[in-house]
Image: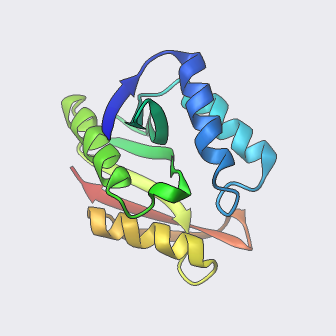
């Protein structure tokens, strides 16, 4: 498996769609999924490729002059817990540091609502993120938004 930077918008769109469609437990709202796919084409985009097939991706969004965000990411289920997310995260962090960002943030669902998102949150904690704040209604009351941050 290798991580590559993807610059072509059509390739970004195809990779994001293929990965997110494999993850309905996380990406089940069609409108939101389409927004993630569309918006990620405008951002730095890293894909994990295994034997010619994209098995994961991360897109990075600037949120301030000092901070970038993991806007959206996903790893095909068959590749969970195989180092794919960690490898993409390392590539994204390297790029963020090169761009001069000091902090990285990510948004996910607060603890205790869904097992899938608890696993996601634990991944981010292992990568060095810490909980900053929960916004109970940013998305909706059934999906309280946890903002996590880390210093690059």
Residue 70 appears in view? yes
Residue 80 picture location, percent across and down: 45, 61
Extreme residue toward the bottom, this view: 112
Residue at 32 percent across and 64 percent down: it is 129
On screen, residue 67 versus residue 70, left or right, reads left
Residue at 33 percent across and 49 percent down: it is 104
Residue 101 picture location, percent across and down: 26, 38
Of 3 and 114, which appears nearest the observer?
3
Q: In which quarter of the image is residue 91?
A: top left
Residue 115 picture location, percent across and down: 58, 78
Extreme residue toward the right, this view: 30
**Location of the N terminus (image quadrant):** top left
Of 139 and 36, which appears nearest the observer?
36
Of 90 and 39, which appears nearest the observer?
90
Instruction: Report the number of numbered marks.
Output: 0
Q: In which quarter of the image is residue 139?
A: bottom right
Is 152 placed above or below 82 here?
above
Extreme residue toward the front, this view: 51
Is 43 placed above or below 137 here?
above
Of 10 and 110, which appears nearest the observer?
10
Judging from the image, the colouring scheme is rainbow
Is 60 placed above or below 134 here?
above
Residue at 40 percent across and 73 percent down: it is 122
On screen, residue 14 versus residue 122, left or right, reads right
Residue 66 picture location, percent across and down: 29, 40
Residue 133 appears in view? no
């Amino acid at each position: 498996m290798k991580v590559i930077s993807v610059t072509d918008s059509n390739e970004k769109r195809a990779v994001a769609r293929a990965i997110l469609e494999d993850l309905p437990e996380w990406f089940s709202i069609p409108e939101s999924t389409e927004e993630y796919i569309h918006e990620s084409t405008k951002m730095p985009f890293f894909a994990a490729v295994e034997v010619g097939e994209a098995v994961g991706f991360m897109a990075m969004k600037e949120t301030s002059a000092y901070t970038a965000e993991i806007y959206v990411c996903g790893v095909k289920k068959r590749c969970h817990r195989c180092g794919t997310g960690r490898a993409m995260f390392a590539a994204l962090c390297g790029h963020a540091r090169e761009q001069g960002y000091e902090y990285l943030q990510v948004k996910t669902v607060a603890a205790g609502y869904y097992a899938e998102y608890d696993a996601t949150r634990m991944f981010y904690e292992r990568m060095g993120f810490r909980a900053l704040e929960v916004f109970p209604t940013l998305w909706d009351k059934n999906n309280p938004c946890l903002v996590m941050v880390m210093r690059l």
